[in-house]
Image: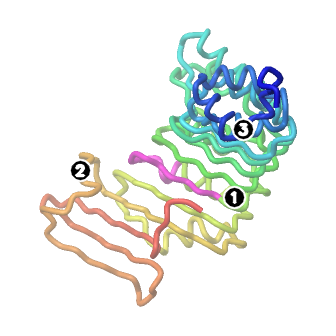
Amino acid sequence: MNPSAVHLLDLPDEMIINIFNKLSNADVLNSILGANRQLDRLARDTTPVDDLDFDLIYQMIHLSYVSLNKLHILKSTIEYYNDTTQMNLNTNTYTRLFSVCQRLTHLTIKGKHLRYYSLLPEYALPLTMCSSSTIVKLYVNVRTIDDCLRLLDGRFNQMKILNVIIDSIDTPLLNIDSQYILPNLTKFFFSVCNSTEEYDNVIVPLLRRMTNLETLVLFLLIENRPKFIDGVHLHQEILIHMPRLKKFIFNITTIDDVVHINYWLKKDDIEETMIFNDGLPYFQCRVDIFKNGIGRCRLCSIPFIESF
């Protein structure tokens, strides 16, 4: 072979990968994607998506993934500040994402929260930014219950599986009573990172909209509720509204007062502990009474898993 006539494609894959490793991720994607099928494959295999900014992700999608039906975005954030420039940047990025990936059915956005910081209505998540009639599975982290309600307001009208982790639940700005039934949703994973006093006002009405659920996973920390959440409550207030439910996995802790964060895992200063399972092997109810009179009840399925 004439050394002066050697083409990049004549090199073995290992040598091409070594060349790519000498370049930045941005240079690889901007220079290589769309040029050749072999180089496309090597560029995608050697360039971690979680290290890219959204403009580069968009370029990669636009060049090679118009027919994409599954997408994972790691270590990403949609953040809304009072800064209009930052808002427009994030809005445009996701507008382009959904406009290009018109066949997208599975979307996972992990890392930081899908969130906004302003409480002003005009800074709410725009319908035109996050909407799809093709997505059936969505995994996402959000900051508030309003963000979650927006995901369930019809903009993803074919969604069957939703896995959502919420940072906190306070009194929502949106009217839950006006939300419609979710007939297509069959699997719902719902985890709240911080304690909430809005269980009866927010979570119960939300779950009652999911009449066709087959799988439900709940991880909740409920604060300042005089009555503990028990099996009778779950059946009468939630489960009877889900006639098709086949799998229910849960870990629900209730504390009957406003407490310091330590109380959720506190093991000392307990005066009395009672454990109930009614002879059933698949769930356990543990009630701890602290010396100051505060009560904590943990109701969980056995085993409890964090996702499905």
Q: Residues within 10 Å of mark 2 (few under 14, many from 20)?
A: few
The answer to whether 121 appears left or right of 31 in the picture is left
The residue at the point 55 percent across, 60 percent down is 307
Q: Say what amino acid the circle numbered 2 marks.
A: Asn
In the picture of the structure, the residue carrying the numbered disc 3 is: 42
Camera-nearest residue between 169 and 47: 47
Q: Say what amino acid the circle numbered 3 marks.
A: Leu
The residue at the point 45 percent across, 56 percent down is 220
In the image, which is nearer the foreground, mark 2 or mark 3? 3
In the picture of the structure, the residue carrying the numbered disc 1 is: 210
Cα distance in 3D space between marks 2 and 3: 49 Å
Would residue 60 be visible to someone looking at this image? yes
Find the residue positioned furthest to the bottom. Answer: 279
Q: Position of residue 281 (x, y in %)?
A: 45, 86
In the image, the segment drawn in magenta is: 188-201
Would residue 178 be visible to someone looking at this image? no
In the picture of the structure, the residue carrying the numbered disc 2 is: 262
SS under mark 2: helix
Q: Position of residue 5 (x, y in %)?
A: 83, 23
Above/below status of 60 relative to 89: below
